[in-house]
Amino acid sequence: MIAVLPVALCLILALSSLLLRNSLKAQRMLASVGSFTVLGLSLFIFYQVWKSGPLLLAFGNWQPPFGITFRIDLLSAALLVVSSLIYFSGVLVSIGSLNLRVEVRGYYPLFHFLMLGILGSFSTGDLFNLYVWFEILLMSSFFLATLLKNKNAVQGGFKYAILSVISSFIFLGGVALIYSGTGTLNLDQLSKISSSVPASAFTVGLGLLSFAFMIKAGLFPFYFWLPASYPYVVTPMAAVFSGLLTKVGLYGLVRILAPHLPLLDSSLAFLIQALALISMLLGVLGAISQDNMKGILSFHIISQVGYIALALALGTGVGLAACIYYLLHHMVVKTNLFFVVSYIESREKRNQVSKIGGLLDRDPLLAILFAIPALSLAGIPPLSGFWAKVFALKALLASKEVLGVLFSLAVSLLTMMSMLKIWLGVFLKPSPHFHNNPKPARWLWFIVPLILLNLWTVTMGLYSNQVFEVAQKISRELRHEGHQP
């Protein structure tokens, strides 16, 4: 029963916020307490899964493959924890930074529905209901993306919606083919299907699902909606989007490909590797060319998604473990950087690198809270980003992927350059303005989540071996390798 509680609570929060639409204070209180409770439940679920194995809930006592199921294994539990941490942090930053005009347009109910879709996606045990949760996520994220109602936000939101609808149709086609070839949509049963199963419908279905998930993850050439929409989303929600939306697509890829990629034709793995390498390079080059801080960070999502997909496409156990470690690192670091930008926007009333300066002298605490995730993203030791790249490079070297190693090193250097661009321009450069803007009135609402997320990044780096052991255990579970090293 506990497996459904985080999702059920998100639904209760969404409906309650609609009933409390005339009381913004009550909505804020409900969101902060509710999201904290979801985080607590997710931590307890992770503990239970780590201790006793996967949690299974069959609705109406209809057992798979006939009934709707929630199945939370170690991968799902880990993603529930990280997503809930971002949820709670996002609520706090939203309270600290948003103006009344945005909040009264249904921001909090939509936020809860978004998290309903995300947590449902990570919890569901079958493909069709994964599609249903994706659609809930799509609808709520579209309305959140266009909440500002300006031209750029609406145009970016429609690009995102159109591509998402296309991917949903492809997703449905893949689901239909897999069901016709196997007679089941249960994810656990599908993961155990061997190469002895008739290949045609099942293999084509996996290919279609992979295509749909690559679109949702923002891999080249399907990434254009990211820089077209994220810079124009209210910044706290852009942070949540950056940490979670593309990662749901990557989760789908991991879930369906991890057990089967070594058995499939190598052309699919080669295609994913090629798209990942192009994404890595184009994403970081796009970031360097931007002046808008949200634009820089949006292009970086494309680049980092490429890293994660590249490790997955190796089709090895160590590559999958590196992919999972990188995923858990990047979800938090990218969200954290967007939260810092939200703080800067609230203080400076602008987000262009060329129009801000002197923040190191005026706000040294903010400089530290930016430097930690920025250095982590660039891969500087001993932070989580350094180890994420080390584990990925080890997996690439083990597979003799020399081109992947060279790309990874080059992109890491370019990532450092883009982070230096923000550091030198926003923090070290003298302020172009004569006045000293005060801290935002509700600045403490920013500081708590920034400290929490920075602690996650530092802890993942300092305890990298222990976290990687968790990633390796997840890899073995997904590949059904028992407890072999």
Image (cartoon, rainbow, N blue to C red):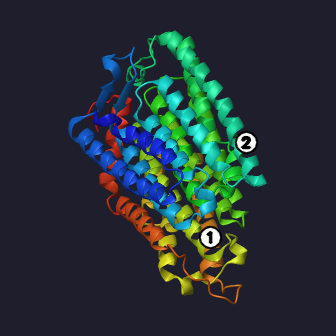
- The N terminus - image quarter: top left
Front residue of 360/462: it is: 360
Mark yes or no: residue 108 visible: yes
Disc 2 residue type (three-letter): Phe
> Which of the 4 image quarters holds residue 457?
bottom left
Do residues under tags 2 and 1 come within 8 Å of each other at their CB atoms?
no
Q: Please provide percent x and percent y for residue 75.
A: 37, 39
Q: Is residue 294 left or right of residue 475?
A: right
Mark yes or no: residue 329 visible: no
> Which of the 4 image quarters holds residue 58?
top left
Residue located beneath label 1 in the image: 345
Report the residue at 76% width, 47% height from top: 155
Report the residue at 44% width, 24% height from top: 126
> Which of the 4 image quarters holds residue 218?
top right
Front residue of 14/330: it is: 14
Q: Residue furthest bottom?
A: 434
312, above or below 166, in the image: below
Q: Please provide percent x and percent y for residue 67.
A: 38, 17
Q: Is residue 186 left or right of residue 250?
A: left
Distance in Å between CA atoms under marks 2 and 1? 25 Å
143, above or below 380, in the image: above
Residue located beneath label 2 in the image: 158
Nearer-N-terminus badge (2/1): 2
- The C terminus - image quarter: top left
Report the residue at 68% width, 38% height from top: 161
Disc 1 residue type (three-letter): Glu
Report the residue at 60% width, 60% height from top: 235
Q: Please provide percent x and percent y for residue 51.
A: 21, 40
Is disc 1 placed on a helix, strand or loop? helix
Please tell me the numbered disc located at residue 209.
none
Q: Residue furthest front?
A: 22
Q: Please provide percent x and percent y for residue 120.
A: 44, 36
